[in-house]
Image (cartoon, rainbow, N blue to C red):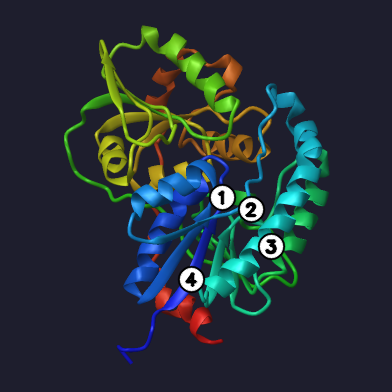
Amino acid sequence: MQNQPKKRILVAPLNWGLGHATRCIPLIHVLVTHNFEPVLASDGAALKLLQKEFPDFKTVELPSYNITYAKKGQFFKLKMLQNSPKLVRAIKAEKKATKEIVEKHDIDGIISDNRLGVYSKHIPSVFVTHQLKVLSGNTTWLSTKMHQKIIKRFDECWVPDNIGEDNLSGALGHTSVVGIPVKYIGPLSRFKKINCPLKYDLLVLLSGPEPQRTYLEDLLLKELKRFKGQLLFVKGIVDSESKASVIGTMTSYNFMTTDTLEKAVNESRIVLCRSGYTTVMDLAKLEKKAFFIPTPGQFEQEYIANRLTKLGQVPSCKQADFKVGMLDDVEHFSGLKPTDYVNNYKKLFSLFKSK
């Protein structure tokens, strides 16, 4: 049995910020421990991040979606509609590329994190998402229906959350669906909690597509000049190497790899960041207090931020409203807490051994 070749699993996260790639990291590690051989596929910053995290693994570049956010939040939905022809073309190219990758690299199974065209009718294909319900304002019913139609092309849908009330995604990941084999696999985080002295009073963690990432960076660099305390600023720009600079009490990095960022978050008293779902999972794992600024116009992040604020866990505000003094509100909130969830990965991965 030990001499049998390892089954190859194509792991393909969407390049939409770094969240989809980073939450695939723990899945990739578990695949290895269960004697699978991951082949990694994405594009842009997400692919660069995976290559830095797993330099010895095979990687493949997929066609880029080339989706950008609107400059103003109120035009987010319009921008998405304008991008839809580009998205359709990208998915078509993605399907063609996937077929070629499956044949060239002898792929035995697929795990696609929100890449809509990365699946195959000939091998087990899994779609990873925390959005069974896709919020889009008054068109939520339509965006949800379209998304679920895509999910049905896969053999299974894995939701990185708990199945019960003690969950992180709320209505996003806990909506009744018909005809979709859904499995809740528990929150995914690449981090571990470390008991260590606090070094930073505030960690700013930026991520997400342009131009909104840059808009928030400019806003925070200006506003946080009045912050008193040790400040660590991680910009979320994946370059060839991680570069640090120190100005006064602020230390800034363009990006951090998993090990260095894990240490930094553990050493920070408060984290200021977007309310992306992967970030929420990471901060819950590390039991952190945070302040959320959702990406303007992105309904999903606005929902998560509002929900956690109402639950008394994390304060939040609109991007245009942020003032440094709002960080004092963090002390009146409980912070995020981990959930006790043990996944049976042997059973979960049995899909890839059944065909």
Residue under label 4, please give it.
9
Expressed as whole percent of the image width and height from the top left, the position of residue 131 reads: 64, 53
Q: Residue at x 56, y 23 (%)?
A: 317
Expressed as whole percent of the image width and height from the top left, the position of residue 192 reads: 29, 51
- Depth check, mark 4 against mark 1: the one in front is 4
- Depth check, mark 2 against mark 4: the one in front is 4
**SS at circle 3:** helix
Q: Residue at x 43, y 22 (%)?
A: 329
- Depth check, mark 3 against mark 1: the one in front is 3
> How far apart in space, not on screen, are marks 2 and 4 (Cα)?
23 Å
Q: Nearer the viewer, residue 170 or 247?
A: 247
Residue under label 3, please give it.
95
Q: Nearer the viewer, residue 263 or 334?
A: 263
Q: Between disc 2 and disc 4, whose residue precedes?
A: 4
**SS at circle 4:** strand
Assess disc 2: are there few (<14), some (14-19) or many (≥20) residues with their C-alpha within 10 Å of its C-alpha: many
Q: Dividing the image into 4 quarters, which one contains the C terminus? A: bottom right
Where residue 201 sits, quadrant-wise, is top left
Q: Between disc 3 and disc 2, whose residue precedes?
A: 3
- Judge whether 92 appears above or below 84 on screen: below
Residue under label 2, please give it.
131
